[in-house]
Image (spheres, coloured by chain):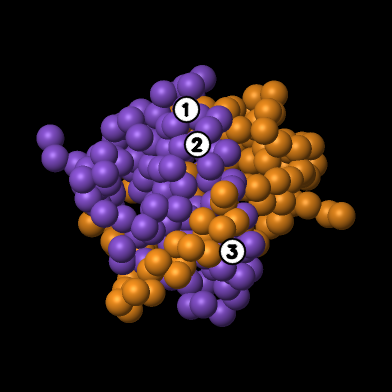
Chain colours: A orange, B purple
């Protein structure tokens, strides 16, 4: 199956690569939320976060930490936004973590807006459903 | 310093806890983007993702993987959104990873909108700045 990220990893498609290590690569998103927005991908083709093999978990966070720091140290951002879409809103079915530079007043304050609220007694039902599969 | 998440972890503030393990806790966000939205936190008070100690990286992803799966298995979601705000838009200065259930057509398609684009020759400058601090 054709995967645009596997093509970048294989060197068959161009990208501005900022990190290239044994198991991970990070490159600029061609259509950034803010300039400097990168995508961190495992070189192995896995589709979503739950599919990431256990032996890659530590390195995945280590790279995300360094990229988050680089947004501040390299681009002068005040912070970063780090996000994964699993399945829904996932444009490429190859796990990718967005690392986006953030600055106060950049207009993304509404990222988690709008919020909703639970009716009285409703939250426990949601928690119970989650607890039942997490136990 | 008073930290609302440390108070929840200590049992001094109530929350609907869905995961409670040696180093991590996850509980419902009281003002969810979608019902079932949880916050995964390390029990140790660290402020941002780059501050997470190396020995907690593997467990942090392991818990996020299980929570992502639980959104589908427990709540019938089609996918999930997993995100961290570092510093900017970070309402509580204790590292927390949002895990939000997602369903197609739920109205969050615009999460990464609007996008911008690089002028010709501009992307390499951003990549160079990131490469210079990542090397």
Considering every residue shown, the one lying at the far right of the view is A1
Q: Nearer the viewer, residue B17 or B132?
A: B17
Parent chain of label 2: B
Residue B9 coordinates in the image, percent (x, y): 30, 41
Instruction: Give the residue at mark 2.
Output: B60
Q: What is the C-alpha distance between the residues marked 3 and 1? A: 26 Å
The label on residue B56 is 1
Measured Cα–Cα span from mark 2 to mark 3: 20 Å
Where disc 1 sits, the SS reads helix
The residue that appears at 26% across and 44% down in the rendered structure is: B11
* Residue A123 visible in the shown view: yes
Q: In the figure, residue B32 lies in which quadrant?
A: bottom left
Instruction: Give the x, y percent position of residue B120.
Output: 53, 50
Circle 3 residues within 10 Å: few <14, some 14–19, many ≥20: many
- Extreme residue in the left direction: B1
Q: Is residue B7 left or right of residue B56?
A: left
* 2 or 3: tag closer to the N-terminus: 2
Q: Check whether the beta carbons of the residues at disc 1 and disc 2 lie within 8 A of each other.
A: yes
Q: Kindly check if marks 2 and 3 are in contact, taking CB atoms under 8 A apart as contact.
A: no
Total label count? 3
Pointers 1 and 2 within a single chain = yes
Q: Quadrant of residue A123?
A: bottom left
Q: Nearer the viewer, residue B61 or A86?
A: B61
Please report the residue visible at 75 percent of the width from the left and 37 percent of the height from the top. Answer: A44
> In what element is the residue under mark 2?
helix
| Image position, residue B57 (x, y; %) | 50, 29
- How far, Cα to Cα, is label 1 from label 2? 6 Å
Circle 3 sits in a helix, a strand or a loop, which is it?
helix
Say which mark, if any, is on residue B74: 3
Say whether residue B125 is left or right of residue A117.
right
Q: Residues within 10 Å of mark 2 (few under 14, many from 20)?
A: many
């Amino acid at each position: 199956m054709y995967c645009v990220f596997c093509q970048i990893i294989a060197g068959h498609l161009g990208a501005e690569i900022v990190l290239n290590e044994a198991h991970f690569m990070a490159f600029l998103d061609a259509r950034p939320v803010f300039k400097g927005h990168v995508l961190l991908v495992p070189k192995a083709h896995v589709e979503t976060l739950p599919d990431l093999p256990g032996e890659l978990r530590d390195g995945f966070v280590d790279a995300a930490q360094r990229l988050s720091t680089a947004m501040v140290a390299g681009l002068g951002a005040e912070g970063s936004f780090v996000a994964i879409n699993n399945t829904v809103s996932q444009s490429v079915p190859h796990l990718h973590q967005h690392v986006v530079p953030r600055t106060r007043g950049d207009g993304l304050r509404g990222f988690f807006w709008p919020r909703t609220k639970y009716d009285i007694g409703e939250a426990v039902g949601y928690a119970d459903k989650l607890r039942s599969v997490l136990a």
